Structures are given as structure tokens and as C-alpha cells.
Image (spheres, grey):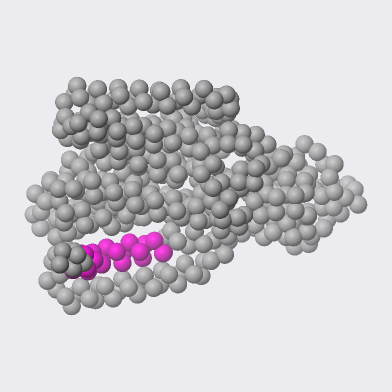
Amino acid sequence: MLLATGIVLSLYDMAKSRLTLLFGLTLFFFCAAPFFVQKSMYNDGIWYACISKNLANGIGSFWTPQLTTTIFPSFHEHPPLVFGIQSLFFSVLGGSIIVERLYAFSIFLLSAWLIVRIWKKGFEQDSALAALWRLPIIFWLLNEVIYFFYPGNVLETTMGVFTLASSYFLWMAMEKQSLPQSIFFLGLGGLALVGATLCKGLVGLFPLALLFLHWVVFRSTSFLQMTFKSLILLALLVISYIILLTDAMALEGLGKYIDSQVFASINAERTTYHHRDSRFYIIKRLFEVSIPSLILTGLLLYASYRQKGKYQINRTTRLALFYALIGVSASFPLMISPKQSFYYLLPAIPFFALSMATLTAPIVMKYLQALEEKPRLLRKIQLVLSFALVGGIIFTITKVGTISNRDKVSLPDIEKIGAIVPEGTTVGAKAYTAQLVGYLYRKYEINIDTSSFDYDYLILDGEKDHLEPPDFTKVIDGTQRFHLYHRQ
């Protein structure tokens, strides 16, 4: 009897939330899904797939991974945890280019699940609002950083899983009165923080601020208790890192990463990629990518104001502020380094999405309840969204195997080269691009060497090299940028 009652209530909840489900799925298939099924991938993501596949094949080691035999034979640009995790996918699923897409999609789904867990944690005393868990996912999907870069296999997506998990555990620790229970969740949160830093470095430590922010916003515990729990967390982190660094390989690998990436970025010594003249670039981009979510939030708040729904908004203001402050702690410190790109915001976006969804949830619930009293209008809206969802699925299908605008010139050339040059060959080149190195090695395991032309094949970049090399003959006609030559 209890089971039957639970099933009936679940079906009722599904019917009540059908609009948000349809809207969320439509957003996914129009915005995110097309990028998951393309042939193209973001340059960094291609490199990370190459490194992970090498690890799965026994090439390189966890603390000294390898990109190719000629370009970054020892890769210390980032900590290695993402490569280690992704290599498990290659070990189980093989070397197909679908593997990194499956990994990226798995991280996407895991991130969405953690957002829902945090949402339900925030509304554990309000089952009606907790049932609107699709709302933060909608706000999350409205951000271009999400649908461009989750399919791009960048490191920040995996780091975001660890920071979301850490935030959830640390929140639990703050609300536990029992010291053993608090230490248990502090331990889980601390381990997740270690995982985050082993994905992308010190930027993964921002959930450390959660304990203080929780005290500032909710005051559910004393300042002394918050400080004591913070000290326990710091002690656990220090112990974890000491144990980790007793491994000589770990100490050497992380030391090289800190020298080559962290200090160099802070001191503006690395200006080739993502170097910004203004350190406020990241804040400007945060505002720009949040415009769709901000517009939706503004419209809902204005509609509520017109209908005098202020009380319903104020019930959730404090929780919304808590999420927003976590988002600020994840994004504003990025200004420390002049090396900035807007996909660095990926771990912060879920918290801003949670904040805006929390602020507007009572308003959305009110409109959904009003629609239940107008079944004909409700059916019409559901029908429109159903057609939109079908359109989104069809749109995604049309994008299967397509090439992005970024790769529309380069990738066809690389595929023509890969069809001629034997797999595993090393070819000479005057210079390389991330696309050339990444796609040639990922698809054909062809290495690029810019230090020597003493090879049978030579590749020239038409955008940089305009003179045909002596003693070489052009092999392929019709290439637009990357031209293949063979020694006579």
C-alpha cells in the first residue's frame, strides 16, 4: 500500500514538473548535445585525450604523462588526475574518438546530479521547492560556458565535480552537531578538495571559503565552532598533501607543474595563450555569459513584484546569497593571474545557477500551480515544448560527425594527411598549432617535430610558410592550410 501511494505521488510530481523537464531537455538538445556529437573538439580537450589514451596504453606515467614523443614528451602543464581518470575510460572502452565524448558526457551528467543534490539539500525542509530540481539545471544550461566547454573535455569540468562534491560535504559538516559526524564529512570534503587541486591546481581550493560563508549567511553555529571546523579541515588537507608528497615522483611532478605553470602565470611570464591586459577580464566575461540567466531572473522577479509576491521571494533570499557568495569565491580570485579564459569560470557557474534558481523558485512554483488550474492552457504549452524538444533532437542528429567553424579548414587537411602518412610516423614542420599536433596524434599517432626536417615527410602551415621547401614535392592537392610534402 505504501509503495503504491509512493508511485502515485511520484507520477503526480512528474506531471506537475513536466513543463520544466521539457524546457530543460529542449535546452540541452539545442545547446549542449550538438557539441557532444561533433567530430571537432576544443584544442585543449584533444591534447588531454591524447595524454589519457597514452596512459591507458602504458605510454608515460601518472606523474610524468606524455603528449607525443616530440611535443611535451613530459607533460607538466597541469596536475595529472584528470588524465588518470580518463585513461580508465580508454582502458575499458578502447581508443575510439567516442571515448573522450563519453567521458565528457559522464562528467556533464555527474555535475548535473551533484547540482540537484545540493539543491535538495538547500530545500530539505521544503519538499515542494525541492521538487523543482530541474530549475537550477535550466539556469545552468543557459550559460554558454556550459554548452561550449563540457563537450570540450577541458580540465575544469572534472575539477567542478570535485568542488561540487566538496561543497556538499562541507555544508553537511557545518550542520552536524556531533563532532565525529562533522569530522567524517570534513574528511570527505577535504579529500574532494585534494582531488580538485590535482585536476587544475590551487584554483580548486575555493570551497574552503564555504565554512566561513555558511556562518556569515546562516549563523546556525557559533564563530568558535566554525573556526574549529575550519582548522580541522586545514589540518586534514595538510596531512593529505604531506602523505602525497612523500612519494618522490609526486613531489617531482607537482614541483615541475608549479614552476612551469603557477609561478609563470602569476608573474605574467606566459603570454602566448589567454594572457589579458586587464585582470578584470574574467569578471567582465562572467557578466557577459550570465546575461541569459540574469534576464530570466529579472523577468521572473519583475513579474512577482507586479503581483506583490515579495514575501515568497524573501523566504529564499538568504540561501540564494549563500550560493552566490560561493560562486564569487570561485571566480573573483581568478583575477590574481593575468592568464584568464572564460572557461575557467566553469566550476563557479553551478553556484550562480543555484543562486538564481533559488531566488526565483517560489515564483516558478506559483506559476506552475496556477497552470494546473488551467488544463487546456497547460496542454497547449506542453504540446509546444514537446514539438520544440523533437526539433532539438532532430537538430542534434544533423550535427553528428560535423566539423566546427574553428576546424572547418584545418581538420579536413589533417584527415587528408593522416590518410597518406603511415601511422606512428614522425614528420617535420617549421611550426605547429595545437590543432595540428592534437588531431594528428589523436587520430593517427603521427608526431610533429619542429627541431629537424630530416624526415621523409614535411608539413607546412600555409598561413605562415609561403615558400616551397627544396628537395621536397607536394603530395596532396586541394589542402587549404596544412600542406604535405615528401622528400624527393
Residue at horizontal 78%, vertical 55%? Answer: 421
The image shows residue 167 at horizontal and vertical percentages of 31, 38
Q: Is residue 394 magenta?
A: no
Q: Position of residue 85 (x, y in %)?
A: 51, 44
Magenta span of residues: 8-30
Q: Which of 214 and 243 is in front in this view?
A: 243
- Judge left or right: residue 464 versus residue 272: right
Percent x, y of residue 216: 20, 30
Which secondary structure dominates the residues rendered in magenta?
helix
**In this picture, residue 191 sits left or right of residue 261:** left
Q: How many marks?
A: 0
Residue situated in front as seen by the camera: 361 or 106: 106
- Above or below, comparing residue 466 to residue 378 in the picture: above
In reply to whether residue 20 is colored magenta, the answer given is yes
Placement of 462 over or under 5, stated as above or below: above
Residue drawn at point x = 23 percent, y = 49 percent: 120
Can the viewer see residue 42? no
The N terminus appears in which quarter of the rendering? bottom left
Residue shown at 22% from the left, 26% from the top: 226
Q: Is residue 364 above or below residue 376?
A: above
Please say whether residue 427 is visible from this viewpoint.
Answer: yes
Query: Farthest residue in the front direction?
Result: 1
Q: Which residue is drawn at 56% across and 46% down?
A: 87
Q: Where is residue 472 in the image (x, y as percent from the top left)?
A: 87, 50
Give whichever of 278, 318 is nearer the camera: 318
